[in-house]
Amino acid sequence: MIDEIDYKEPSCALCGGKEFYNPELATAKGRIPVKRVIEKVDEYYNKNDLMGAKRHLEYWEKEANALNDFNGELSVVDELLGLYRKNGDNENALRVLERALILVDKLELKDTVSGATVYLNAATTYKAVGKADKALPLYEKTLAIYTANLDESDVRFGGFYNNYALALTDAGEFDKAEQCYLSAIKVMEKAVGGKPDLAITYVNLAHLYDTANKAEKITDCMFTAYNLLNDEENVKNGYYAYVLSKCAPSFKYFGYDKIASDFFKEAKEIYERS
């Protein structure tokens, strides 16, 4: 990674930032070990130990706050946003969402890719708690920043379009949501190791067609998702298990009970081996 001042963003929530860019950071009493914190939370996820991940992240959230380590705190609360969504803890999700947006401003990340990634996470959280009206402006802000700074084939667009489409579906903008899913597919088809995420896109697209009364398109989507999830190139790790468990209820919803059962079983076995 290029690390010279002339080429870096003003400060980066993922790499610790530099006081040169933001003198306020010099007031920090210390720094939390962000890389080790994230590595440890990944270990919890690989075991599907969400409570362990919660305790771990909440501890480091308090530590970063006590140290006035704004960069470290932003990295942790950004992780907590995703965790609280998984746990359905809407109250805490909204709490850390507000803090994340404050930190983006404080660290002057508003026009950076790092800041846009936080906006994306916040928008997805708003959508998850039923506030699509608040999510859409953040998705649009994210898109503007990504478009200005990233190549159109960047894998981050895949996740963006997927989540944006879900919010658009909630808002009744079905045609725009479909275009977003098709854009996500275009990106993820070229991504190394992207088949599980591509499967999620096809499953989401099937649900869109169900909502939009286009039942004739559902079978092809689910069949494609099934083949992607069973591709021999997939790495059978904790994330793959998470994707299986995320997609299984959709297969059951569309009448593929045996496939759903097999996916739940395989996910459980992967978690037990981790």
Image (cartoon, rainbow, N blue to C red):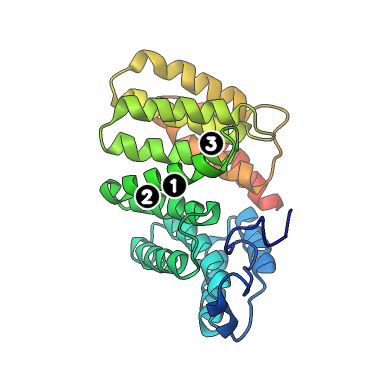
Element at label 1:
helix
User: Where residue 70 sits in the image (x, y, percent)?
Assistant: 53, 74
Q: Is the residue under label 2 in contact with that under label 1 (CB below 8 Å)? A: yes
Q: Residue at x 60, y 86 (%)?
A: 29
User: Where residue 169 sits in the image (x, y, percent)?
Assistant: 32, 34
Tell me if mark 3 has few (under 14), some (14-19) or many (20+) residues whose alpha carbon lies within 10 angstroms of its own. Answer: many
How far separated are the C-alphas under marks 3 and 1?
Answer: 13 Å
Say which amino acid is labelled 1. Thr
Query: On the picture, is 240 further left or further right than 183?
Result: right
- Which residue carries the number 1 mark? 142
Say which amino acid is labelled 2. Leu
- Which residue carries the number 3 mark? 158
- Give above or below for 113 relative to 193: below
Q: Is residue 257 visible?
A: no
Tell me if mark 1 has few (under 14), some (14-19) or many (20+) residues whose alpha carbon lies within 10 angstroms of its own. Answer: many
In depth, the one of 145 and 157 nearer the eye is 145
Query: On the picture, is 165 further left or further right than 171?
Result: right
- Which residue carries the number 2 mark? 138
In depth, the one of 165 and 2 nearer the eye is 2
How far separated are the C-alphas under marks 1 and 2?
Answer: 6 Å
Q: Nearer the viewer, mark 3 or mark 1?
A: 1
Q: Residue furthest front?
A: 6
Element at label 2:
helix
